[in-house]
Each structure stands twice: as structure tokens, then as C-alpha cells.
Image (cartoon, rainbow, N blue to C red):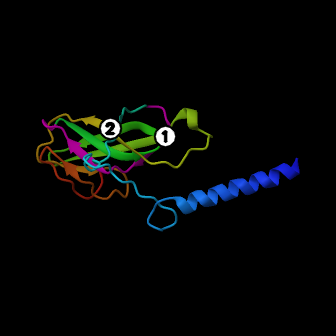
Amino acid sequence: MKTRTLPLLLVVVALASCARAAAPGNGSGGVTSTQIPPGSGTPGPAQPRIVTPSPGLADVRPVTWTKATASADGTVLTVDFWGSPCLSIDHVGVKETSSAVTVTLYQGMLPSMVGSACPELAVLEAVRVQLSSPLGNRSVVDGAPSASPPPTEGGGGTSSPGSSS
């Protein structure tokens, strides 16, 4: 049995070396580039997957978000964040004042994934947040600790640094 394993292993190594040598790329460690077919235009920005909060997750913590976009009428914010296949949004904290809307996303582990290995894969996701009154000129602030000011689009709001107190 051992006499068959060595030749098979050598064939696998040889094929892997050939594949690596033949792969198109820019010469930097086998990184390949993808060409866009003519007439197809350029790829657009990634669209986030919309998620709905699922209360009852494990190990819930505040998570920073990357962007808040107001609806045309300013009553709903779509808040983008980076998630993973093992995590979801447990709940969303919203604090509205006359000058700002502070949004805090609370992310936790899916109960089915507790104790399991989770792939380190970032997934662009978003959650929709209903406001009690239109955003208007109020700023949108990330309430997670150590949050840097995220961009805000639409509804006349602007982002501002800081977190809720």
C-alpha cells in the first residue's frame, strides 16, 4: 500500500506546482486578476444582505457599523455593518434627540453555532431601523464603544463623532 501512496503524492504535488505556475496573475504570490468581459460595465458596489434582529443570541456585544443611509422620507435608516455566517444582530438600540440619532447594533452568536468552529468570513449586512420622526438635519452616531464617525447618506443628516452617553 505504501508503494502506491508515494507516486500518488508526487503526482498531486506536480499538478499543484503546474497549476500555480500556469495561473494568470500579476506575479505577486499567485494572485490572479479577473477581467471584465467587454460591454458588461464595471462591477457596482456590493449590496448588503438585509437582516432582521433575532433576540436571544449568545455572547451579545455592541458592534460598530460602517454606514447609515436614510430613506427618501427620512423615517427609516439602513445601517450597514460587517457580519459573519455565525453571527447575527440580537437587537438595535436607538436614542433620538433633537440634534442626533444614536444607533447601537448588538451582535451575538447564533445558538446553533455555540461551541462550533466558525469560518472567518466577513459578510456585508444591513439592518433597517424605524425612526420615531424623520431624520431631517440630525446627525447619525454609532453608539458602539470606540466607534469612528461613519458616513451618513440621504435625509440631510450628517455623521458626527462620539458615542451615546
Q: Which residues are magenta?
A: 55-74
Residue flagged by tag 2: what amino acid is it?
Answer: Val
Please say if the residues under marks 1 and 2 sit with CB atoms less than 8 Å apart. Answer: no
* Rendering quarter of residue 34: bottom left
The amino acid beneath tag 1 is: Pro
The residue nearer to you, when weighing 74 against 11, is 11
Name the residue carrying label 2.
127
Q: Give me the residue at 37% from left, 51% from top.
A: 64
* Image coordinates for residue 50, horizontal then vertical, percent: 34, 35
Q: Is residue 90 left or right of residue 42?
A: right
Q: Residue at label 1?
A: 85
Question: Which residue is at 65% across, 55% downward?
Answer: 15
> Residue at coordinates 32% horizontally, 48% vertically from top-left?
37
**C-alpha span from label 1 to label 2:** 15 Å
Q: Position of residue 147 (x, y in %)?
A: 34, 56
Query: Which residue of the protein is positioned furthest toward the bottom in this rendering?
Result: 27
Q: Is residue 156 left or right of residue 111?
A: left
- Mark carried by residue 75: none
Q: Nearer the viewer, mark 1 or mark 2?
A: 1
Side of 61 relative to 41 (left or right): right
Instruction: Specify which label sits upstream in the sequence, 1 or 2.
Output: 1
Q: Quadrant of residue 135?
A: top left
Say whether residue 62 is magenta. Answer: yes
